[in-house]
Amino acid sequence: MERARLMKNLRTSKYKQPKYFVQQNGKNWEVVEFPTNDIVSVYAKKIDAEMLSEQINKTKPFGDRTLPKFLKSYRLDIRE
């Protein structure tokens, strides 16, 4: 019985669902996915990054799953 209760709690855990937030990196603003800490997108303006994070948090395109790797930004900034 104890095991079944534990599995039910993990399935409905609030930490399982991805969250998206904005952080500043130098002059750019990044939208970051919480459970994986991957960068989803990079913007020059804070307002653009906040709009994307609010939109993804409001309507999660993949439900309880994180965004696929091909939709995330893996560009390196070599302008410095």
Image (cartoon, grey):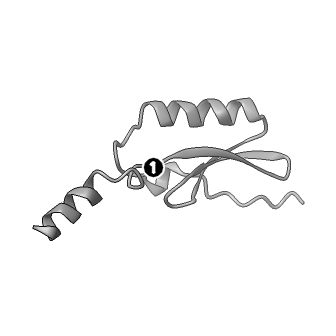
Q: Residue at point 41% right, 37% down?
A: 60
Tell me if 25 is positioned left or right of 38 in this view. right
Residue reaching furthest to the right: 80
Tell me if 49 is positioned left or right of 71 in this view. right
Q: Quadrant of residue 59?
A: top left
Residue type at mark 1 is Pro
Please state the horizontal and vertical placement of residue 69, each as a whole percent of the image.
47, 57
Residue reaching furthest to the left: 1
Q: Residue at point 66% right, 34% down?
A: 50
User: How many labels sit on residues?
Assistant: 1
Please state the horizontal and vertical placement of residue 71, each as a whole percent of the image.
50, 48
Q: Decide: few, some or many residues near mark 1? Use Cα within 10 Å; few <14, some 14-19, many ≥20.
A: many
Residue reaching furthest to the bottom: 3
Q: Nearer the viewer, residue 53 or 77?
A: 53
Tell me if 65 is positioned left or right of 47 in this view. left
Q: Nearer the viewer, residue 14 or 22?
A: 14
Tell me if 38 is positioned left or right of 13 in this view. right
Query: Where's the N terminus, which quadrant?
Result: bottom left
Q: Residue at point 46% right, 31% down?
A: 58
Q: Nearer the viewer, residue 47 or 78?
A: 47
Query: Where's the C terminus, which quadrant?
Result: bottom right
Q: Quadrant of residue 6?
A: bottom left
Please state the horizontal and vertical placement of residue 78, each as a whole percent of the image.
82, 61
Q: Residue at point 85% right, 53% down?
A: 26
Whether residue 44 is situated above or below residue 74 in the rendered picture: above
Mark 1 lies on residue: 18
Q: Secondary structure at mark 1?
A: loop
